Image (tube, grey):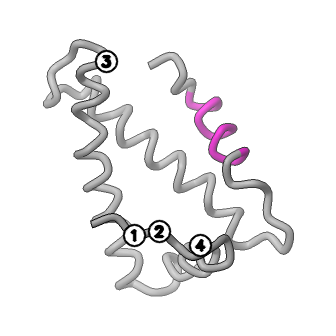
Amino acid sequence: MSRRLAGPEQARRLVRGMGSVPAIRMRWLAAGREMQDQLVPALAARNGAPESGMEVRLPARALLDAIGVAMEPLAWQDEPEDVAELTRRALRDLCIDEW
C-alpha cells in the first residue's frame, strides 16, 4: 500500500524524526530496501543485466541514498530548497542519467 505525505511540512517533520527517533529510522531503512527491490527489475531490464548482479543492485541503492541525502536539507533549512531541484542535483552528481 502506498501512502503519501500531506505536504512539505509533514515531510520535513518525518525527515527530522529519522535522525532522532530510532523506530522511524528503522522503518525508513526498511522502506528504502523495499523501494530498492522494486527498482532493481526496472534497472536490470533497461541494462540487460541480471537482477542479482552488483551492476544493477549498486545503482539502485545509490539512487535511493542520493534521494535521501537530497532530502536532508529540506528538513533543517528555514527556507528549504525545492525538493525536486535537490533531487535533480543529487542525481546529476551521481551521473544517474547515464544508467
The reply to whether discs 1 and 2 touch (Cβ–Cβ < 8 Å) is yes
Q: Residues within 10 Å of mark 4 (few under 14, many from 20)?
A: some
Residue on which disc 2 sits: 4
Residue 21 coordinates in the image, percent (x, y): 45, 87
- Mark earlier in primary sequence (1, 4): 1
Disc 1 element: loop
Residue on which disc 3 sits: 46
The label number, if any, that marks residue 11 in the structure image:
4
Up/down of 42 relative to 7, above or below: above
Q: How crowded is mark 1: few (under 14 residues within 10 Å), some or many (20 or more)?
A: few
Residue on which disc 1 sits: 3
The magenta-colored residue range is 85-94
Q: Residues within 10 Å of mark 2 (few under 14, many from 20)?
A: few
- Mark earlier in primary sequence (2, 3): 2
Q: In whole angstroms, how far apart are the C-alphas of marks 3 and 4?
A: 31 Å
Quarter the C terminus occupies: top left
Name the kind of residue labelled 3 in the image: Arg
Name the kind of residue labelled 4 in the image: Ala
Q: In whole angstroms, how far apart are the C-alphas of marks 2 and 3?
A: 27 Å
Which residue occupies 57% across, 24% down? 95
Q: Residues within 10 Å of mark 3 (few under 14, many from 20)?
A: few
Magenta segment, principal secondary structure? helix
Discs 1/4, front: 1
The reply to whether discs 2 and 4 touch (Cβ–Cβ < 8 Å) is no
Which residue occupies 40% across, 81% down? 24
Name the kind of residue labelled 1 in the image: Arg
Residue 41 coordinates in the image, percent (x, y): 22, 32
Q: In whole angstroms, how far apart are the C-alphas of marks 1 and 2?
A: 4 Å
Residue 8 coordinates in the image, percent (x, y): 67, 71
